[in-house]
Structure formats: C-alpha cells, structure tokens
Image: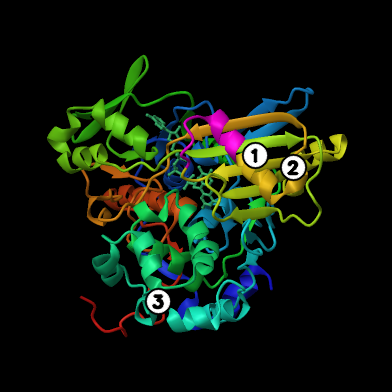
Amino acid sequence: MTPDLTARAAPLRMRPRAMVPADPRLPREAPAGTEAVVVGGGIAGVSAAVVLAERGVAVTLLEAAPTLGGRLGAWPHTLPDGAEQVVEHGFHAFFRHYHTWRALLRRIDPELGFLRPVGGYPVISRQWPAEDLTGLPTAPPLNLLALFARSPSLGLRDLLRSDQALAAELLAYDRTRTTAIFDEVPAARFLAALGMSDRAQAMLFEAFARSFFADPGVLSAAELIAMFHYYFLGNPDGIGFDAPAADYLTAIWQPFAAYLEKHGAEIRRGTPARALAPAAAHGWRVEVDGGSVTTRHLVLATEPPALRALLAASPQVAEVAPRLAAKAAALAVAPPFAVTRLWLGRDVAPERATFNAVSREPTLDSVTVYSRLERPSAEWAARTGGSVVELHSYACTAPDADTATTRMRAELAALWPETAQAEVVHLQQRLEATAPTFPPGGAGSRLAVTGEGRGVRVAGDHVDTPFLTGLMERAAVSGVLAANDVLAEVGAGPEEIRGGPQRGLLAGLLPRRR
Ligand SMILES: Cc1cc2nc3c(=O)[nH]c(=O)nc-3n(C[C@H](O)[C@H](O)[C@H](O)COP(=O)(O)OP(=O)(O)OC[C@H]3O[C@@H](n4cnc5c(N)ncnc54)[C@H](O)[C@@H]3O)c2cc1C
C-alpha cells in the first residue's frame, strides 16, 4: 500500500488531525513592517523562517556554518580520485507521519519526488537472526499482536512471563499520566521490569532507544514510552520511512534557500550570533561579528550546546528572561555521536538491506548502504566497482573519531565478513556532541517554544512541544510553533499543524499506579 493509502485505511482514531487549526477569520499576512530574526539554519530555524517569510515578515536568518541544514546539512566534497560528491552530516530516515516537516518540504517539491521508500529495514545482531519490524498492521493492538506473532524474538513465553500491567502502559500512553509515573524512571529499568527475554529486549527495544542518542540507562522511560507510541503503536503509517534519492544539499537546502530568498528573507551564512541583549521597545539586539541586528521578534533555533554557549555569553538576558537563562544553562546534551562514511573498494553482499539497525554492539548502531540509496554514491560505486557505506554510533564512548571508526569497522566486519578485507578508498568521519537528551526526571526543566522570555521563542529538537513529535518532526513543529507565536502577536492567523493520535488505545482505562 502507498503511504497515503495506508493512512487513509487506518481507523478513524488513528487518522491525523489538526493539532493547531488554521483560523480563516484572521488575516494571513502579517502587517507591513513586521520583521524577525531567526538564529540557526537547521530544520527548526528554516521551518520558522519559511512560515514567517510566506506571511510577509521580513526575516533575517543567521547561520553560523557556511551551509544551511545543521545536523541534516550537506556540503560539496572532492574524493581523492577527483570525483565531486556532496557528503551529508549523516543518513536520515524521513518517517511518513512527519506531517509538518513533509508539509514544509512540499513547498520545495510538491510531490515529494526526491523521497524514495527504503523498503524493509532489519535490526541485525551477531547473536540472533535479523528482525524486520516493517509491514506490520498499523492499528493497535493489531500491530502489537502481529509483532508477537511474527517476531522470532518475542514468543508466547515472553507474553506470559512479562509484567502485563507494565506492558499495558505502552498501549496507554497519555502525556500527563505517562510523565507523572515514568519521567523519573530510567528506560533500562522499565525495560528490565517488563520481564521480557534478553533477546526481545535487545532486538526490539534497545536499538530503538539508542536511536534517541542515549543508552536506555540514562533515558527517561516516559520519553521512551512516548516515542514508542509516536513511532510505532500510534503511527497509522507503520514505522516505514523514506529517504532522499539525491544528496540533501541538492534535494533540500538549495531549494529552501531559493524559496526563502524568493519570499524576501535574508540568509546570512557563516554568521554566528555571538551574544544577545535586551534592546529598546521590548526588542532584542543580536551581536554578530562586526555589528549587530535588532529585532522585535527573536527565534533561537540552535542545537542545545550552542544555545547554552550563546546564553552564557549574554549575561543581560537573565535580567529580562530569567527562565530562559536558567533553563539554557541547565540544558542536557547527549553523549557524542559518531558518523563515518566509507568509500570501499568492493561491494557488500547482495542480500544486505539498505538501512540496518544494529543491536548489542558496543559502538555500532546502524549501517546504511549509501550506494544503494543515493544517486551520486550509486554512480561512484558503478564506476569503481566499490560501495559507499555509512556507520553510525548514537551514544559513542570512543575518545575520538579515529577510534570510533576503528571500532565500528571491526564490529561491521564481524556482522558483514565481506567488509573485513575491503580496501578503504576514502573515508569521512565525525564525532560530535550536539544532540539533545531526555534524562530521567528532566521533563519539568525542558525549554518550551513560548513563555521563556518576552519577544523570544525557542525552537529545535530539544524543545518540549505541546503534542507528540520526535527528532526532525520535533524540530519542524517547534519552528512552526515559534512562527505562529510571532504571527499571533501581530494579529495574523496561525499555520495549521497536523498530528497523529495523542493517546494510546488503553489510555484512561488502566487502574491508578502508585
Ligand atoms: C547521525 C544522526 C542521524 C539522525 N537520524 C535521524 C533520523 O533518521 N530521523 C530523524 O527524524 N532525525 C534524525 N536525526 C536527528 C535530526 O538530525 C535532528 O532532530 C534535526 O536535524 C535537528 O534540527 P534542529 O534545527 O533542531 O538543530 P540543528 O540541525 O542542530 O540546527 C541548529 C543550527 O544552528 C546553527 N547555530 C548554532 N549556533 C549558532 C549561532 N550562535 N548563530 C547562528 N547559528 C548557529 C548550527 O550551525 C545549526 O545549523 C539524526 C541526527 C544525527 C546527528
């Protein structure tokens, strides 16, 4: 079934609906003379900038790096053989229930023609046969029952010996209840208490938990339950995803830049905001190298450590926005993630899937065969007889990128022996700590889009959104919410935001827990 048909065939309660409805009684356009400054040109900042610029707001977008995109960024790179390639920050799965991010991408490609289904993606491990979670029914409890019926990792014994009352909490996601009961519980403790076999834990839950850039021991169980609902149990599109068939610079960031400029936005690349200070008339002054910009409407859309550093360099902010200053100072940053792209002298075995989640390796968390996914990599592989493979580690303990690559290569060789002797023609690697994390007990201290300080909005995948979102979709939704708050202040109508079911099938039906 195509993604659209899958969603349409879903039961009524599973269908996407307006979380923020448009208001046709309010003007679409912002009053003439409205301006805004957006700091950070990743998904969150560009999402805010697109909505504001479309409504006639004069947007200045400040991006520290030479290219837009942040953690989804991409830039040109010359291989040793002279081949020009665009390399990405790292492979991304574009899930089909990312309604807001996809609506924004439709501005630059109405048919989303640059996205291709990736097909089934297995969880692979040295210990157990691969497990593929795609293609399950889309509605709970059928998806959960089908998982039990189909998964070699989950047997009747798991069902019988599991703590069924606790397992029911997975089907009973409700923001208030789930946060109240499970925010302070580490995800690892919750998973252990479920009483499932080691294999079921490893193959079904741990790989999933680590894709949120944390070991289950330091991730809040409330966030894990929320994400399990968002990506699996409450997702009418199943957990299928698509990926761009072209590099992200060509497919996403160049078109967004052209779109923004067509709508009058000024994009200042290579221009980090150095400090913020309150300005006259409830405005803000943003210091940049060699000058400053002042604005009435400020959107801060940087990654967590950059926000912490920006606020640390801005002591006056605490005078007018003490909550913002305090929360930014305490922002939690995930351990580093490692991304290594290898241009190999030979192909991997034909049966290898394009995207593979990896379970129970100390370092390696996923493997993507880029030469089966993206045109420029496929062309390079066809010309040389090689392959392009990308390795990710989401909560990496290696001290540096070289060590991370060495460890991930050794673990890959154990999983895919054909790579052990493959010549590495070229490699690109990074080890970087820029992702947010959601530790136990942290729900109350997350930054919200609005209400942290007058005239300032915060966007990014670390921000708490009032309804369920994750990763890229959280970045996009927070950006649109930030833009909506600016539009509300100047009397223009909000941008519609759609979302899926916000509560689990059993929400409201479980007895109280102490
Ligand atoms: C390896 C990896 C794999 C991932 N895979 C997936 C996936 O499969 N699916 C998914 O949904 N998500 C995935 N993600 C998460 C996704 O990349 C992020 O959720 C999303 O890109 C965050 O966007 P953002 O705009 O919040 O932050 P960022 O992308 O970090 O953007 C912040 C921007 O602010 C800029 N900036 C920082 N400081 C300043 C300053 N002082 N002045 C001006 N600009 C500044 C930065 O340069 C950057 O461009 C993955 C992330 C990584 C790292």
Mark 3 crowdedness (10 Å alpha carbons): few <14, some 14-19, many ≥20: some
Of marks 1 and 3, which one's residue comes earlier in the chain?
A: 3
Mark 2 crowdedness (10 Å alpha carbons): few <14, some 14-19, many ≥20: many
**In front of the other: 379 or 209:** 209
Q: Residue at x 80, y 36 (%)?
A: 380
Q: Position of residue 16 (x, y in %)?
A: 48, 71
Q: Residue at x 49, y 37 (%)?
A: 70
Q: Amino acid at mark 1?
A: Arg
Q: Secondary structure at mark 1?
A: helix
Check whether the beta carbons of the residues at disc 1 and disc 2 lie within 8 A of each other. Answer: yes
Of marks 3 and 2, which one's residue comes earlier in the chain?
A: 3
Q: CA distance from mark 1 to mark 3?
A: 36 Å
Identify residue for label 1: 409
Residue 419, disc: 2
Check whether the beta carbons of the residues at disc 3 and disc 2 lie within 8 A of each other. Answer: no
Residue 403 drawn in magenta: yes
- In the rendered view, does 380 fall on the left or right side of 146? right
User: Within 8 Å: ligand 1 and the Cβ of disc 2?
Assistant: no
Of marks 1 and 2, which one's residue comes earlier in the chain?
A: 1
Q: Is residue 275 above or below residue 354?
A: above
Q: Position of residue 67 (x, y in %)?
A: 54, 30
Q: Amino acid at mark 3?
A: Ala
